[in-house]
């Protein structure tokens, strides 16, 4: 799957996630205590991407790159090109349609300030469909007219949004409650470089990629709930682990506020089964 950080060494992913969180914590502590003189060593700062903000009203600002992007985050080089105007417009329409499914409470929890539409998005030269850069508080989204992007864009978007709600990416903090739902013998594959898992998902996982790290597991399940709710409802009838993960994810989201529109409704499914 050509996907955020796809095929990147998972060790890099771990370092990226740790570094991104670390920088976030430092930034918070500096702004919280302005009275104290703090000596900070100058460090090369990445060049902020140049973009123009879309004039289309959006619950989260959308920027379209106006110059080629070349920024670094946690030792990884992120590059992208200016998208074609018609491609950016087409993706922008899809983006708005999907964002309108989210309640304000969830959008307010995003740990990013902006979506940035680009083309030929790459992380350490590898192609990505989307990339959540927590350190710089933006989500890059590939805006091209390829069949791959056209057909998978909603899934990429929801996956990245889950990373942004989580405030995690790649190998993140452990999640004991989530991991306890996995079979005892299961271990995520994500702390060494492994080929991206593809193919039929194992029981308990929304997709094969969900077995890479606990963070990706959450994001892939969230994605499936958003784009394939009926398929997910069918699977949880016979997959106890996946059903338990959906319950946990749902309870965490409910703590923030209402669920997104189109979220799988188990009660409705149950009734419709009885109706048959
Ligand atoms: Zn991901």
Image (cartoon, rainbow, N blue to C red):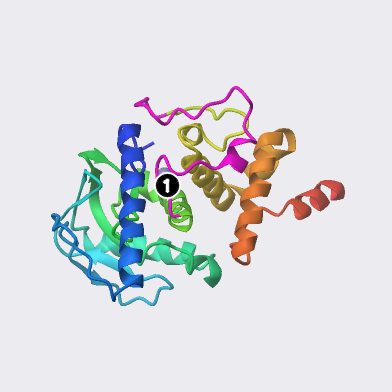
Find the residue positioned furthest to the top. Answer: 185
The overriding secondary structure of the stretch rendered in magenta is loop
- Count how many numbered circles sit on residues in the image: 1
| 84 sits left or right of 94 in the view | left
Q: Position of residue 262 (x, y in %)?
A: 61, 59
Image quadrant where residue 43 sits: bottom left
- Is-magenta flag for residue 187? yes
Can you say whether 63 is above or below 151 in the image?
below
* Mark 1 CB lies closer than 8 A to ligand 1: no
Find the residue positioned furthest to the front. Answer: 36
Q: Is residue 147 visible?
A: no
Image quadrant where residue 185 sits: top right
Can you say whether 201 is above or below 168 in the image?
above
Image quadrant where residue 118 sits: bottom left
Residue annotated with mark 1: 152
Q: Position of residue 151 (x, y in %)?
A: 42, 47
The structure residue drawn at horizontal position 65% and vertical position 36%, both measured from the top left corner, is 181
Q: Is residue 224 visible?
A: yes
- Is-magenta flag for residue 67? no
Q: Nearer the viewer, residue 45 or 47?
A: 45
Can you say whether 263 is above or below 189 in the image?
below
The structure residue drawn at horizontal position 25% and vertical position 43%, both measured from the top left corner, is 123
Q: Position of residue 25 (x, y in %)?
A: 36, 58
Quarter holding ligand 1: top left
The structure residue drawn at horizontal position 59% and vertical position 49%, both measured from the top left corner, is 225
Please report the bounds of the magenta region as a residue range.
Answer: 167-196
Q: Position of residue 24 (x, y in %)?
A: 34, 58
| 237 sits left or right of 165 in the view | right
Quadrant the N terminus occupies: top left
Secondary structure found at label 1: helix
Q: Nearer the viewer, residue 94 or 207?
A: 207
| 99 sits left or right of 181 in the view | left
């Amino acid at each position: 799957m050509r996907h955020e950080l796809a095929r990147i060494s998972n060790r890099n992913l771990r370092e990226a996630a740790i570094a991104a969180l670390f920088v976030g914590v430092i930034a918070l502590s500096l702004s919280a205590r302005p009275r104290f003189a703090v000596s900070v060593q100058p460090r090369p700062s990445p060049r902020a991407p140049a973009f123009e903000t879309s004039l289309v009203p959006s619950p989260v600002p959308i920027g379209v790159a106006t110059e080629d992007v070349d920024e670094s985050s946690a030792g990884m080089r992120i590059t992208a090109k200016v998208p074609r105007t018609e491609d950016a417009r087409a993706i922008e329409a899809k983006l708005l349609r999907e964002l309108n499914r989210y309640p304000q409470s969830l959008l307010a929890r995003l740990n990013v300030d902006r979506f940035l539409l680009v083309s030929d998005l790459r992380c350490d030269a590898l192609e990505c469909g989307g990339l959540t850069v927590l350190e710089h508080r933006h989500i890059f989204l590939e805006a091209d007219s390829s069949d791959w992007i056209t057909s998978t864009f909603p899934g990429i978007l929801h996956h990245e949004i889950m990373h942004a709600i989580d405030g995690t990416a790649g190998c993140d903090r452990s999640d004991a409650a989530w991991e306890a739902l996995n079979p005892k013998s299961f271990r995520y594959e994500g702390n060494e470089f492994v080929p991206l898992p593809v193919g039929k998902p194992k029981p308990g996982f929304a997709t094969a990629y969900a077995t890479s790290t606990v963070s990706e597991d959450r994001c892939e399940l969230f994605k499936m709930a958003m784009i394939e709710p009926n398929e997910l409802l069918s699977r949880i009838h016979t997959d106890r682990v996946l059903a338990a993960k959906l319950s946990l994810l749902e309870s965490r989201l409910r703590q923030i506020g209402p669920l997104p529109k189109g979220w799988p409704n188990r009660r409705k499914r149950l009734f419709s089964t009885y109706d048959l």
